[in-house]
Every structure is written in structure tokens, then in C-alpha cells.
Image (tube, helix red, strand yellow):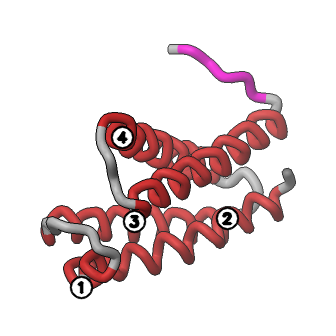
């Protein structure tokens, strides 16, 4: 994976997170009800929308950045968010029956986690960095 491919990952994530974040921030009730998601907490839904907009903004900055310019920290942030999100959703999927959209949410988060892990590993290999322990 080269810098151009990492930029593509940032670009796709910026678009997806931006659209979903904006919809959840502006019209969470109508959007989630259309998907059959109930009950809806409009405050937490809007906070999730704000978080997705912030992650989308970070991806926009990563897309615009030159190779190696702070993109490592952005990739790690995106990776941590998607891994924690996927694990959180998976925990619920394993203990109860959930509609298809929750499975789709898990697949999307897990897919992004894999994409960001790939970008992170490529960045470490490119820079010759080895993971360090505290």
C-alpha cells in the first residue's frame, strides 16, 4: 500500500463518515426510524453524529496531508475508534438477537478497522518503525 492508496482510504472514510455523521446530527429520529431502529435517543444519536463528523474531518485532513505528515496519529485514532466500536457491537450481537442493520454496522466497523490496521502497518513498515511498548 502506498501513500496514494492511504489517501484513498482517507477520502472514502471522509465521505462516508461525513454523510452518516451529518444525517445523524441533523435528523437522527427520522433516519433511524426509516431503518427500523428503535427506540431512539436523539441526544446520543446527535453525539454519535458529531463524533462521526469529527472523524470525517480528521480523514479530510489526512487526505490533504503530505506523506507522513501527522497521518500516523490520525490513522491510529481511526483504528482505535473502529476497533472499539466493532468490539462493542459484537458484544451485543453475541448475546441477543438483533436486526440486520446491527450486523451491517458491525461489518462496516470491522471493515474500517481492517483498513485502518492495514494503513497503520504500512506506515510503520514504510518508516521502519517498530511498535514500542511503554
Tell which tag, 1 or 3, sits nearer the viewer.
1
Tell me: 15 left or right of 20.
right
Residue beneath disc 4: 88
Question: Relative to 75, does residue 42 appear above or below in the rendering?
Answer: below
> CA separation, marks 1 and 2?
36 Å
Residue furthest to the front in view is: 97
Tell me: 97 left or right of 9.
left
Magenta segment: does it hold 28? no
Question: Relative to 124, does residue 32 appear above or below in the rendering?
Answer: below
The quadrant in which residue 84 appears is top left
Residue sitting nearer the eye, 88 or 62: 88
> CA separation, marks 2 and 4?
31 Å
Q: Position of residue 58 (x, y in %)?
A: 50, 63
Residue beneath disc 2: 65
Q: Mark 1 or mark 3, which has the lower sequence index?
A: 1
* Residue occupying image coordinates x 36% and y 40%: 88
For the record, the magenta segment spans: 129-133
- Tell me the element at label 3: helix
> CA separation, marks 2 and 3?
20 Å
Tell me: 32 left or right of 7.
left
Residue beneath disc 1: 30
Question: Relative to 27, does residue 103 appear above or below in the rendering?
Answer: above
Dot label at residue 17: none
Dot label at residue 52: 3
Amino acid at each position: 500500500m502506498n501513500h496514494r492508496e492511504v489517501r484513498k482510504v482517507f477520502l472514502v472514510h471522509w465521505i462516508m463518515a461525513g454523510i452518516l455523521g451529518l444525517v445523524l446530527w441533523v435528523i437522527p429520529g427520522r433516519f433511524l426510524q426509516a431503518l427500523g431502529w428503535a427506540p431512539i435517543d436523539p441526544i446520543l444519536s446527535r453525539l454519535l453524529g458529531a463524533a462521526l463528523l469529527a472523524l470525517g474531518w480528521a480523514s479530510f485532513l489526512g487526505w490533504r496531508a503530505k506523506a507522513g505528515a501527522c497521518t500516523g496519529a490520525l490513522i491510529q485514532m481511526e483504528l482505535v475508534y473502529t476497533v472499539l466500536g466493532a468490539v462493542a457491537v459484537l458484544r451485543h450481537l453475541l448475546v441477543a438477537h438483533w436486526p440486520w442493520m446491527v450486523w451491517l454496522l458491525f461489518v462496516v466497523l470491522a471493515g474500517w478497522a481492517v483498513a485502518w490496521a492495514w494503513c497503520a502497518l504500512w506506515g510503520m513498515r514504510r518508516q521502519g518503525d517498530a511498535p514500542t511498548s511503554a
